[in-house]
Amino acid sequence: MTRLKLAMCVALLGVVVTATVAVAGGRSSLRARLSGYNELPLTINSPGRGTFRASIDRSTQTIHYRLSYEGLTNVQQAHIHFGREFVAGGISAFLCSNLGNGPAGTQACPAESGTVTGTITPADVVGPANQGIAPRDFEGLARAMRAAATYANVHTAAWPGGEIRGQIPGKHGRAHDED
């Protein structure tokens, strides 16, 4: 009788774990390393470098991110852009801005070195509509990020088109699905 109860408990535990994985199945973790050597259309010999990490949760339609950078001067803004490696693309979401040009609630960028963290929701997705991602199209941005069709970059006064850039996810892997 004890073995039967144990077997039933193990089976029930298996059902609970499977259901939990199915609920969490909409999550992905991504990261990128930012460098001037990744910038377009010109490669930039910059002392700046950075990292970008994000966790996409499709069930709650949120992207939690952390952008850290150093070696830059007079940072103006940072974004997620819609574009594959070696391709420039339009802005999909603001990470920070010192220019007052982001959506309401966009945080300020550290001027030299620092870290910004935040959460992107559908209200924070700004496009680019001319590339098929409409404002508020969270699912379109999430798909693009998982497909390595987005990049993070940091713009400075010296390099207003972007001084450091990193493909999301980095070239050493695709999105990592969390279980």
Image (cartoon, grey):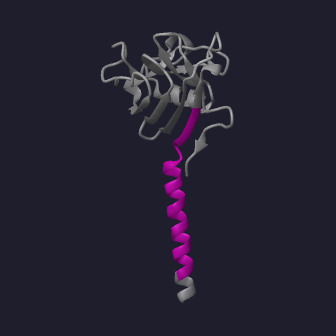
Tell me the magenta residue range.
6-32
Residue 53 magenta-highlighted: no
Q: Can you give x and y, in whole percent of width and height, for residue 28 in the image?
A: 54, 41
**Residue lying farthest to the left in this orientation:** 104
In-image side of 176 versus 160 (left or right): right
**At 46% across and 21% down in the image, what residue appears?**
78
Closest to the observer: 73 or 6? 73
Was residue 15 drawn as part of the magenta stretch in this picture?
Answer: yes
Up-down relation of residue 65 to residue 78 (above or below):
below
The one of 124 and 53 positioned closer to us in this rendering:
53
- Classify residue 115 by image quadrant: top left
Left or right? Give the position of 155 relative to 47. Answer: left
Q: Quadrant of residue 102?
A: top left
Q: Nearer the viewer, residue 94 or 48?
A: 48
| Depicted 6 relative to depicted 115: above or below | below
| The N terminus lies in quadrant | bottom right
Query: Going by the picture, which residue comes out furthest to the bottom?
Result: 1
Q: Position of residue 116 (x, y in %)?
A: 41, 31
**Residue 110 on image: x %, y %:** 39, 25
Residue 59 in the image: above or below residue 148: below
Residue drawn at (50%, 10%) of the image: 158
Magenta stretch secondary structure, dominant: helix
Which residue shows up at 67% across the image and 17% down it? 86
Pick the residue in front: 131 or 159. Answer: 159
> Is residue 112 positioned above or below 25 on the image?
above
Q: Is residue 174 left or right of residue 108?
A: right
